Amino acid sequence: MGPTASGKTALGCALSERFPVDLISVDSALVYRGMDIGTAKPDQATLARYPHRLIDIRDPAEPYSAADFRADARAAMQEITAQGRVPLLVGGTGLYFRALQHGLSQLPEADPALREQLSAEAATLGWPAMHLRLAQLDPTAAARIGANDAQRVQRALEVIALTGRPLSEQQRGGSGERFPWRVLKLALLPTDRAPLHERIAQRFDTMLADGFLDEVRALRARGDLHVDLPAIRAVGYRQAWEHLDSQSDAAEFRDRGIFATRQLAKRQITWLRGELDARAFEPERPGLLEHAEQALQLFLGSPG
């Protein structure tokens, strides 16, 4: 586990060279086909050498939920385990990790009237103001939800209004079902964010040079995609979509994309710090691979 651009994929691939593990992607953007450059999806050569499950399994027009991931990941884990190998889950989508291990809490169904009311308020006040309201009611949920993530802000406020309880508190409850695998959590958790921020900026510039905007143009040309879909709300894609709608110039688009990615990393780090049973590793630390190998060796060598 780790924030975006922290080196998770490279570490996962390196570990698969040494141990009998099969890789499963835990990333809410990598599931979508045709979204390769802006998601920093491993290239075809990497995927051919190090196959990842749960990459390119959905069309961007089809939403993919934490419940979908939980079902797909458990099926993949069962298949890998039956083959005498070990599932190695690699990614940064904390909600997916939590749903997989702890299940999904029974949240209330959507209330159309309440949603319409919240949307009307947002039309007047703006979603950042609605996010500030959420921060007062549920700071934990607000810390992991972006200020402009309209769908998730609306859902969190809706759940609070319907139940009188914070969304984060209810999500911690889980399903109560026992998770049937032993777990070792390896977290790439930087203590100094400056190198991470530099890598984020460098990677975004590389994406632009590799044709990210052309990729988004191709998605727009389909005609069936829009900014309210989860795929297009992915970090970078929303900012590119708005730029192509002439809502920002090239420099502003770059700044917005990098800022949004840094904010994502900040939320991911906040979530990881709450994973108290995780083994934390400094991504910049020399010998990272060796230390991760030692931890995994001890885990696999322990009795089941």
Image (tube, rainbow, N blue to C red):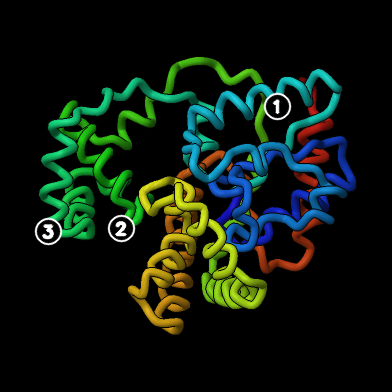
Which of the labelled discs sits on residue 174, or is there none? none
Find numbered disc 3 in the image and state the secondary structure of the residue it sits on: helix
Q: Amino acid at mark 2?
A: Asn
Q: Position of residue 264 (x, y in %)?
A: 45, 59
Mark 1 against mark 3, which lies toward the viewer?
Answer: 3
Separation of residues labelled 1 and 2 (CA atoms): 33 Å
Which residue is at 51% across, 53% downward?
222
Residue 151 on image: x %, y %: 31, 45
Read off the residue under disc 3: 125
Which of these two is toward me, 279 or 117? 117
- As helix, strand or loop, the secondary structure at mark 1 comes to helix
- Which residue type carries mark 1? Ala
x 37%, y 31%: residue: 171
The tally of labels here is: 3
Task: Look at mark 2 in the image and give the residue it sits on.
Answer: 148
Q: CA distance from mark 2 to mark 3?
A: 12 Å
Kind of residue at badge 3: Leu
Above or below 224: residue 109: above
- Numbered mark located on residue 76 in the image: 1
Task: For mark 2, give the secondary structure.
Answer: loop
The quarter holding residue 298 reads top right
Residue sitting at x 51%, y 42%: 276
How far from the left and from the top, in percent, is residue 190? Answer: 57, 63
Camera-nearest residue between 154 and 216: 216
